[in-house]
Amino acid sequence: MTTTQKTADLPAAKSADSAGTPLLQVKDLHVEFHTRDGVVKAINGVNYSVDSGETLAVLGESGSGKSVTAQAIMGILDMPPGRIPSGEILYRGQDMLTMSGEERRKIRGRKIAMIFQDALSSLNPVLSVGYQLGEMFRVHQGLSKKDAKAKAIELMDRVRIPAAKERVNDYPHQFSGGMRQRIMIAMALALEPDLIIADEPTTALDVTVQAQVMDLLAELQREYNMGLILITHDLGVVADVADKIAVMYAGRIVETAPVHELYKRPAHPYTKGLLDSIPRLDHKGSELYAIKGLPPNMARVPAGCAFNPRCDRAQDICRTEVPALHPVTEQDGTTLVGRGSACHFWKETIHG
Amino acid sequence: MIRFLLRRVLGATVILLVISAVTFLLFYSIPRDPARLACGKTCDPESLAMIRASLGVDRPVPVQYWEYLVGIFAGRDFAAGPCPAPCLGYSFRDQSPVLETILDRVPTTASLALGGAVVFLTVGLALGMIAARNQGNLVDKGLSSLSLVMSSMQIYLVGPLVLAVFVYHLQLLPSPRYVDLTEDPVGWFKGLLVPWLVMSIIFTAAYTRMARSTLVEQLREDHVRTARAKGMSGRTVFFRHAWRGSLIPIVTILGVDLGSLFGGAMVTEFTFALPGLGRLAVNSVTQTDLPMLMGVMLFAAAMIIAFNILVDAVYAWIDPRIRLS
């Protein structure tokens, strides 16, 4: 690791060498897909940043653009049909969108790695896990087959796969779901990247295994002081590990907040709806809350605030004007650090 | 592995039994008498009866069939002498031993099939890969149209055309004939070049389209996305991660094609006058030659079955999720 140590519980402390420059910064990113039915604007001006040792949770329903943003950062979007008309993705201050393909490839896997949701389909079914892990070392560091395999075993031990030495030649389908996700994590971790993007890493797993995998990921992140972008729709996962949250809806960030403040006082009706729809044991017997309506079709996003057809607070202005991400303050006007809400009525939502 | 082979061989035996029975029945349901054919125009009832007896067609069909089967496994005795197992009998037409005749024709057919396969597989897969890498653009569309045109061709049209233009008129290509590989390898190659190329025109298209579509499908797989996220180069992603997964459907059609080609490429052999199994099969039908027909049918069926077993074994090697059981 090249950055100086910085612990997650001291979010204000900046590392000296990158004074002010975040590890990764996404600036006004737009992504659109050209399909037969027209242009689908999947991402409409997303901003966020992550520092070393910091965990950003990106929360949203499927289709909200959280995975597309991640793939844009990785540079693995299919282009065409995908296109990035504007925006910047800065890795240590350098815009990756203007880099050559080869420069970009060298960052992928080595500096920024990704963990995918469904490890069974995301691992190659016809190559042994040892080969797939070792490939990282062989391609990026030019290690021999033998050394790469030794490294692969080391990695498997690192993510606590039992009997790694015996299992290194096994194929993905021979592992359980949890073990497969550990292999994915090991693969992302292989070259000790600065940043890991985990796209719903526990969605396909049993609840008991989810906790183990999340704990492992959090532990490794602390140990290597990596930045982590955790993409999820599971509010339960977020609370334990994230430092800050960005809530996405219809290709925009609708709310940002430090993790616990978001849970305590949401400043956007959509976030509030999400929190209210978590089943609670102390409300047993009462009906479950659900946000009415469906997420918008990205080819026909409603005018104004995209959430307006589903929102209880929607007024005329919501149907005509797209709300900017307003800084959220206390009632007396003191700023709340790191908080923002893209709602015309954020005051009413948080204080009302 | 041994259990897999045992089971498949047992299954194959049943299939071959059914095929032989059906062929026998079909043969005797056509209103042509092999004895009368052998007897000629001036034929009196006595000599007809004699020929019947000597061919063995005077006895009931089930008895004939039974003797045929016994002959294969245990050998049988003919008037002319004993025929050791596996005995496929003697030709009605010229009394030549069926098994030897077939084995005599195998090198021609095998050379034709294997050489052709090398050409159409190499060209077909290469074009398929090029199309897949250029998915959606002009190169892809051009190759798609080309393969459509090629697959619409027929050997009996392209063959004579190539012969007339390239072999006889322009004299660019050697004229087709069969020379044994062991006698004259260069002559073997030259003699079969035109049949291989013509055969490949028809077969290549199927492999181009298959390779393209399975590769395009593979390139959309999650694990290919993972490979890109790992920072693998485009070439590694394509050849290491996408290519292997696309082999299964290709191996499947290759198995079917090779199996049937090994059983005799009738049209190709006729077009280029090559003495292979396909010609033998057609001739034995037109000459009402039951033993020869049975022999060729069983050999062709056995080839198709053998290649199917081989394909299943290759599956397990390509994809570790497939187990041989």
Image (tube, coloured by chain):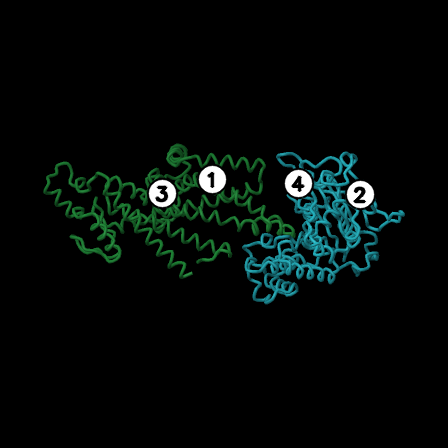
The reply to whether residue A106 is in sight is no
Judging by the rendered image, the residue that carries numbered circle 1 is: B205
Q: Which residue is mark 3?
A: B265
Is label 2 in a helix, a strand or a loop?
A: loop
- In the rendered image, residue A19, in percent from the top left (x then y), is placed at 83, 54
Letter of the cyan chain: A
Q: Looking at the image, is mark 4 or mark 2 earlier in the sequence?
A: 4
- The chain to which mark 2 is attached is A
Please name the residue that numbered disc 4 is placed on. Answer: A82
Q: How far apart are the two marked residues, 1 and 4, measured between alpha carbons? A: 31 Å
Q: Nearer the viewer, mark 2 or mark 1?
A: 2
Closer to the observer: label 1 or label 4?
4
Does residue B221 sit above or below A10 in this rendering?
A: above
Do the dots labelled 3 and 1 sit on one chain?
yes
Q: Quadrant of the N terminus of chain A?
A: bottom right
Q: CA distance from mark 2 to mark 1?
A: 56 Å
Which chain does the numbered disc 3 sit on?
Answer: B
Amino acid type, label 4: Gly
Helix, strand or loop at mark 1: helix
User: Is the residue at mark 3 from the same chain as the one at mark 4?
Assistant: no
* Kind of residue at disc 1: Ala
Say which of marks 3 and 4 sits in front. 4
Residue A325: mark in rendering = 2
Tell me if residue B83 comes above or below residue A98 in the rendering. below
**Going 81% across and 47% down the picture, which residue do you hit?**
A350
Q: CA distance from mark 4 to mark 2?
A: 26 Å
For label 4, count other residues whose C-alpha is less than 10 Å away and answer few (under 14), some (14-19) or many (20+).
some
Name the one closer to the observer, B163 or B5.
Answer: B5
